[in-house]
């Protein structure tokens, strides 16, 4: 595991954007795993700027997002579909058919989970996966206690995660109870992983990860077993 400590959120965003830029330059038809939340906003902004400056093209890039709420319309302002379009996709030349997010509106959610993993496999697997981390160590929406061998599945969100994500909704009670998320094993299958975390709130989780103890009570700890992970982190005060 490679650790890169940064001083500011902007520095974190730039370091992470550079890794994605190099990946796309090296392999124009890269398959990227993407995340939502406050952590990647700066990185996406940076990638849009680099695209506008002509440094990269998303023409042949495919993306797979980690997760989506269940029962929320894609058109809802709080959906991850909307988040990704507002923060990245609308600013670059990615083709709509190359954008993949789990469908939280699917009638048969179990079938959608299976199909999502199959779609990732059919694309050749994820070359580079971006992750944030929840204060309780969740990755994607894999909450503490999730089996390490989980594939894409339906999860019930913890109260702590629902509270953390309430800022994206008009009313805290509107935060869905369930989500569809790539599993820990689906994430571990990525060839390379970059995890970003900035701010005091996140540092306890980062310290836990650094301690090297691998346990299902702390989902991110399974990343210690992956051969190619970079953690970009900072912000102790
Ligand atoms: C949500 C997302 C995660 C994300 C986490 C942290 O729960 N499902 O993928 O990593 O929030 O978000 P933030 O970056 O806003 O702290």
Image (cartoon, rainbow, N blue to C red):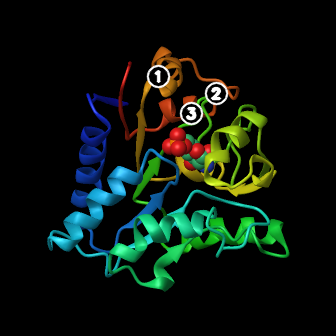
Q: Is residue 96 left or right of residue 45?
A: right
Q: Position of residue 74 (x, y in %)?
A: 66, 73
SS assignment at label 3 = helix
Task: Examine the rendered structure and indicate whether residue 47 appears above or below residue 115.
Answer: above
Find the distance from the CA under tag 2 to the CA under tag 1.
Answer: 14 Å
The mark nearer the N terminus, 2 or 1, is 1
Find the distance from the CA under tag 1 to the CA under tag 3.
Answer: 13 Å
What residue is at 49 percent from the left and 64 percent from the top?
125
Mark 1 or mark 3, which is nearer to you? 1
For the residue pair 66 and 91, the one nearer the viewer reads as 91
Quadrant of residue 153 in the image?
bottom right
Q: Position of residue 93 (x, y in %)?
A: 33, 81
Q: Which residue is mark 3?
A: 220
Q: Position of residue 232 (x, y in %)?
A: 34, 35
Q: Which residue is mark 2?
A: 218
What residue is at 66 percent from the left and 50 percent from the top?
183
Mark 2 or mark 1, which is nearer to you? 1
Ligand 1 is found in which quarter of the picture? top right
């Amino acid at each position: 595991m490679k650790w890169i400590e940064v001083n500011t959120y902007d520095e974190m965003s730039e370091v992470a954007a550079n890794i994605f830029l190099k990946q796309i330059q090296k392999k124009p038809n890269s398959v990227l795993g993407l995340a939502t939340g406050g952590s990647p906003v700066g990185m996406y902004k940076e990638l849009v700027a680099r695209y506008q400056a002509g440094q990269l093209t998303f023409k042949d890039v495919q993306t797979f997002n980690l997760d989506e709420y269940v029962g929320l319309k894609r058109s809802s302002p709080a959906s991850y579909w909307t988040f990704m379009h507002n923060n990245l996709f609308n600013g670059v030349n990615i083709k709509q058919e190359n954008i993949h997010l789990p469908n939280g509106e699917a009638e048969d959610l179990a079938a959608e989970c299976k199909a999502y993993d199959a779609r990732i496999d059919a694309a050749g697997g994820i070359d580079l996966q971006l992750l944030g981390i929840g204060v309780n160590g969740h990755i994607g929406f894999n909450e503490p206690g999730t089996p390490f061998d989980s594939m894409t599945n339906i999860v019930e969100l913890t109260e702590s995660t629902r509270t953390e994500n309430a800022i994206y909704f008009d009313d805290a009670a509107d935060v869905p109870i369930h989500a569809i998320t790539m599993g820990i094993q689906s994430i571990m299958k990525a060839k390379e992983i970059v995890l970003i975390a900035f701010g005091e709130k996140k540092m306890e989780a980062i310290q836990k990860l650094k301690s090297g103890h691998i346990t299902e009570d702390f989902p991110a700890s399974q990343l210690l077993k992956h051969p190619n992970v970079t953690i970009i982190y900072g912000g102790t005060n």
